[in-house]
Image (cartoon, rainbow, N blue to C red):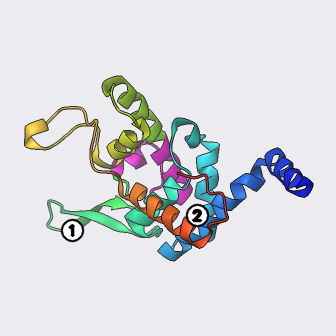
């Protein structure tokens, strides 16, 4: 009993020890998706530096989004269009499949930390807008995540121009929930406090 209390006090005194268990689980689960463990660790550290947990963003959300969008590859291309000359051009590039607006904000879309930083910054700015325009939203961070992926306003004919205050859950959140279920099955003794 005394040894258990001493271990709990050491864990409380060292926040890195508490963070290590969920991080290790996220790194292992992201590796199954194809994410490099170094990239995963750096994205988790970026989330902590940006203090994303303070505004409700779940730990591992950036990694799950990169897994969903590009399978954690820098060379991923998507959202193809045809330019004026008839060539096919990709609008979305890199880990998070960001469009050209990310480069206008100073991001290298093919670098995971640069793209992740712009993604979190855009989500934080969108969170302010959600709190201003969408008063009755229970989880504003979730709507902010949706708005980064799909835009701040609706484009459908019946709701065109209205503020986006709802929508289908982001793909990264679905993957994160699947990872959590898998982690609880694999490691039932671990205290996984993420999500």
Q: Residue furthest front?
A: 1
Magenta region's main secondary structure? helix
Picture residue at 36% right of the left edge, 58% below the top: 171
Q: Residue at x 38, y 63 (%)?
A: 69
Q: Is residue 103 magenta?
A: yes
* Residue appearing at x 48%, y 68% in the figure: 72
Q: Residues within 10 Å of mark 1 (few under 14, many from 20)?
A: few
- Of pointers 2 and 1, the one earlier in the residue sequence: 2
Q: Position of residue 44 (x, y in %)?
A: 60, 55
Residue 134 coordinates in the image, percent (x, y): 31, 28
Residue 34, numbered circle: none
- Residue on which disc 1 sits: 88
Magenta residue span: 100-120
- Quarter of the image for residue 3 reads bottom right
Residue 143 in the magenta stretch? The answer is: no
The N terminus - image quarter: bottom right
Residue 20 located left or right of residue 125: right
Could you tell me which residue is drawn at 13 percent across and 37 percent down? 160
**Which residue is denoted by mark 2 in the rendering?**
26
Q: Position of residue 190 (x, y in %)?
A: 67, 62
Looking at the rendered structure, the number of numbered marks drawn on it comes to 2
Q: Could you say which is closer to the camera, residue 125 or residue 75?
A: 125
């Amino acid at each position: 009993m005394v040894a258990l209390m001493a271990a709990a006090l050491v864990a409380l005194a060292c926040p890195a020890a508490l963070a290590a268990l969920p991080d290790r689980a996220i790194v292992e689960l992201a590796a199954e998706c194809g994410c490099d463990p170094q990239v995963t660790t750096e994205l988790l550290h970026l989330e902590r530096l940006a203090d994303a947990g303070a505004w409700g963003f779940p730990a591992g959300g950036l990694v799950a989004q990169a897994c969903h969008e590009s399978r954690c590859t820098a060379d991923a291309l998507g959202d193809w269009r045809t330019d004026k000359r008839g060539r096919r051009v990709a609008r979305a590039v890199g880990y998070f499949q960001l469009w050209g607006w990310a480069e206008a904000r100073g991001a290298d879309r093919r670098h995971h930390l640069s793209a992740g930083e712009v993604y979190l910054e855009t989500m934080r700015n969108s969170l302010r807008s959600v709190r201003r325009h969408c008063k009755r939203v229970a989880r504003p961070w979730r709507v902010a995540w949706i708005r980064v992926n799909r835009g701040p306003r609706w484009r459908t004919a019946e709701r065109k121009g209205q503020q986006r205050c709802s929508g289908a859950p982001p793909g990264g959140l679905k993957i994160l929930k699947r990872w959590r279920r898998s982690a609880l099955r694999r490691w039932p003794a671990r205290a996984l406090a993420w999500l």
